[in-house]
Amino acid sequence: MKDHTWTELTPRLLVVPLGATEQHGPHLPFTVDTEIAVALCESLARQRNDVVVAPALPYGSSGEHAGFPGTLSIGQEATETVLVELGRSAGAFAGVLLVCAHGGNAGPLGRAVAKLRYEGRSVRAWSPRGPSEDSHAGRTETSVMLALRPEAVRLDKLETGNTTPLPDLIDPLRAGGVRAVSPNGVLGDPFGANAKEGREILHGWGKSLLNSVAALAADVMM
């Protein structure tokens, strides 16, 4: 949308990148989730001319990272409200796809989509998947950032974090936040991360997103 005026927006699928502003260990910037969501949406738009990309939402539900300086969170209730109101305002588009690269948004995102669909709106959500033992600032996200913006990765500050699968950490994480289960903020092991692997991960996620949009186009979205 940044390159369009209102007179140029023929009915197309609106894809909205959803991210977060939160710590990603000692070696990655606060903007990782937002940058990944934007990259995936822009890649999709290059492959489909019936897609338009909205400005990213760089804040979400990141309360689990509150124990680390710099994390900015609007909480679950506000995130849900923002997404619902965005969906309601997008009636000029053929549909809305919320592309979310922050796992902490899953709850409010799911509730928002359910509410909007109950209201009869063409709204869906999609999120990239990764290993449960490498869910935050580990090898996956570090590799992806090395592919997207290598100058933002502090390779001299790599540290292994807690590599316990996320399902086994969820109770103590919810009770005490990420800091309670990983003092350095990493859930995974970033050592061995590389740009080639990052490009492969992005390709796989991009292919999954493209296939999802193709399926939606055959439904009621387009």
Image (cartoon, rainbow, N blue to C red):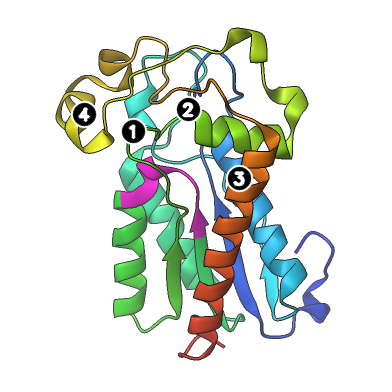
Q: Which residue, given by chain and number where applicable, does mark 4 sit on?
A: 169
Mark closer to the chain start, 2 or 3: 3
Nearest to N terminus: mark 4 or mark 2: 2
Is 103 contained in the magenta span? yes
In this picture, is 51 found above or below 36? below
Q: The disc labelled 2 sits on which kind of residue?
A: Gly
Span colored in magenta: 99-106
Marks 3, 1: nearer the viewer = 1
Q: Which residue is mark 2?
A: 138
Asked if labels 2 and 4 touch by Cβ distance under 8 angstroms, the answer is no
* Quadrant hosting residue 81: bottom left
Residue at the image position 74 percent from the left and 33 percent from the top:
149
Q: Is residue 198 above or below residue 2?
A: above
At mark 4, the secondary structure is helix
Q: Amino acid at mark 1?
A: Glu
Image coordinates for residue 191, horizontal then vertical, percent: 53, 20
Q: Is residue 118 left or right of residue 199?
A: left
Between 48 and 10, the one lying in front of the other is 48
Q: CA distance from mark 1 to mark 4?
A: 10 Å
Q: Which residue is mark 1?
A: 133
Q: Secondary structure at mark 2?
A: loop
Task: For the residues labelled 1 and 4, say whether their Cβ atoms are less than 8 Å apart.
Answer: no
Q: CA distance from mark 2 to mark 1?
A: 9 Å
Mark before the other along the chain sequence, 1 or 4: 1
Q: Residues within 10 Å of mark 3 (few under 14, many from 20)?
A: many
x then y, percent, for residue 115: 30, 69
Residue that badge 3 annotates:
36
Residue at the (74%, 28%) spot, across then down: 150
Pointer 2 and pointer 1: residues touching (CB < 8 Å)? Answer: yes
Q: Earlier in the sequence, mark 4 or mark 3?
A: 3
Residue, x 41% and y 63% (percent of image)?
84
Residue 46, horizontal then vertical, whole percent: 77, 68
